[in-house]
Image (spheres, helix red, strand yellow):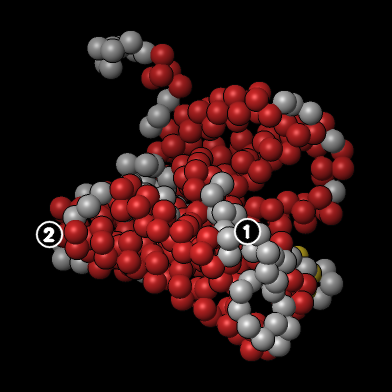
């Protein structure tokens, strides 16, 4: 089976589901298909795309990053607390300081995990609590501001036509697809997730690669916090909390196996759209919040069965009795 064919089997189901949900949404609400509504969708799914890519890289190595939400919150509150508001100096600081902090936070996670030999789940859960405490110390409640130029262009339009969020989405997916498929670093990520022992024996520096994978996760999480600061024109230390589980769900719906070594970023766009449109459809139908949790959970299970590991998880296997593995 060629690599292109494997990728087709891996990512095609998520886009079929996305198309079906999109058609249902357009049937329920005709304005859903309009350009203005799609621009609104671009704005809303951009942070989901960024955290989905971040979590994808980590999951591909067989790890998990539960500190993503806290890193988003930390970058967000730092971004709205910087001095020299409405000056070029503030914009430069807005671009550099939170992203460097996010990168450092991620590298710390990777260093502790690799040097200490601790499980990523526990390490990132613990560091997430620490960074959330730092965020609350910096900004105990929602507030702060960003420069007018940041707020104007983060979710605005380039040349009065091209939505900036759409450009961010295209750029992020294209760049990190190239990183995964065309670089030694990307091939090392897949190798470690596939079999770390074999990867090590093949000469891959597993620890160094994992450290930089978590550094990349922190960097993308901080960029998400920056984006949210411009979108909201304020900060919130808890703004990243919903993105912890959202990032995992989007990565896995997008075709990345939780076992590691299989997946990529090509399905992230479809996964983010599915997740966001589910919220939109359920709200348009005035479904009670209690039933929304049930509906999203059921649809998530179906999506996982259809997309996870290129179909390795099958709906029929869910209902198959133990001991019937070889029975057809």
Label 2 or label 1, whichever comes before in sequence order: 1
> Left or right: where does residue 110 sit relative to residue 136?
left
Is label 2 in a helix, a strand or a loop? helix
Instruction: Count how many numbered circles sit on residues in the image.
Output: 2
Which of 209/122 is in front? 122
Picture quadrant of residue 86 = bottom right
Residue count near mark 2 (Cα–Cα under 10 Å), binned few <14, some 14–19, many ≥20: few
The residue shown at (76%, 77%) is 148
Quarter of the image containing the N terminus?
top left
Q: Where is residue 240 in the image (x, y as percent from the top left)?
A: 55, 54
Q: Where is residue 245 in the image (x, y as percent from the top left)?
A: 50, 43
Q: Position of residue 14 (x, y in %)?
A: 56, 40
Please, is residue 165 above or below residue 146 in the view?
Answer: above
Please, is residue 134 above or below residue 1 in the view?
Answer: below
Numbered mark located on residue 204 in the image: none
Quarter of the image containing the C terminus?
top left
- Residue bearing the label numbered 1: 141
- Residue bearing the label numbered 2: 201
């Amino acid at each position: 089976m060629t690599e292109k064919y494997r990728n087709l089997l891996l990512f095609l189901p998520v886009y079929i589901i996305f198309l079906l949900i999109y058609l249902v949404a357009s049937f329920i609400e005709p304005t859903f298909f309009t350009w203005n509504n799609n621009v609104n969708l671009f704005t809303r799914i951009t942070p989901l795309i960024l955290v989905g890519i971040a979590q994808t890289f980590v999951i591909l190595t067989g790890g998990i990053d539960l500190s993503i939400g806290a890193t988003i919150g930390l970058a967000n509150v730092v971004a709205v607390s910087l001095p020299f508001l409405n000056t070029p100096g503030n914009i430069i600081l807005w671009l550099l300081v939170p992203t460097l902090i996010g990168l450092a936070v991620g590298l710390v996670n990777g260093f502790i995990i690799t040097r200490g030999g601790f499980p990523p789940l526990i390490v990132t859960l613990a560091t997430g609590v620490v960074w959330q405490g730092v965020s609350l110390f910096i900004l105990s409640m929602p507030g702060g501001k960003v420069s007018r130029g940041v707020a104007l262009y983060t979710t605005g339009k380039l040349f009065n036509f091209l939505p900036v969020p759409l450009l961010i989405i295209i750029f992020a997916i294209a760049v990190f697809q190239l990183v995964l498929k065309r670089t030694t670093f990307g091939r090392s990520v897949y190798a470690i997730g596939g079999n770390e022992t074999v990867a090590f024996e093949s000469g891959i520096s597993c620890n160094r690669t994992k450290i930089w994978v978590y550094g990349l996760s922190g960097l993308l999480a901080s960029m998400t916090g920056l984006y949210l600061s411009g979108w909201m024109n304020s900060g919130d230390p808890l703004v990243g909390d919903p993105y912890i589980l959202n990032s995992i769900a989007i990565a896995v719906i997008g075709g990345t196996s939780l076992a590691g070594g299989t997946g990529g970023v090509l399905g992230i766009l479809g996964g983010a759209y599915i997740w966001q449109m589910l919220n939109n459809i359920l709200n348009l139908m005035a479904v009670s919040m209690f039933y929304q949790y049930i509906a999203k959970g059921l649809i998530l299970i179906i999506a996982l069965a259809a997309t996870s590991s290129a179909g390795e998880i099958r709906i029929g296997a869910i209902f198959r009795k133990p001991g019937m593995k070889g029975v057809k």
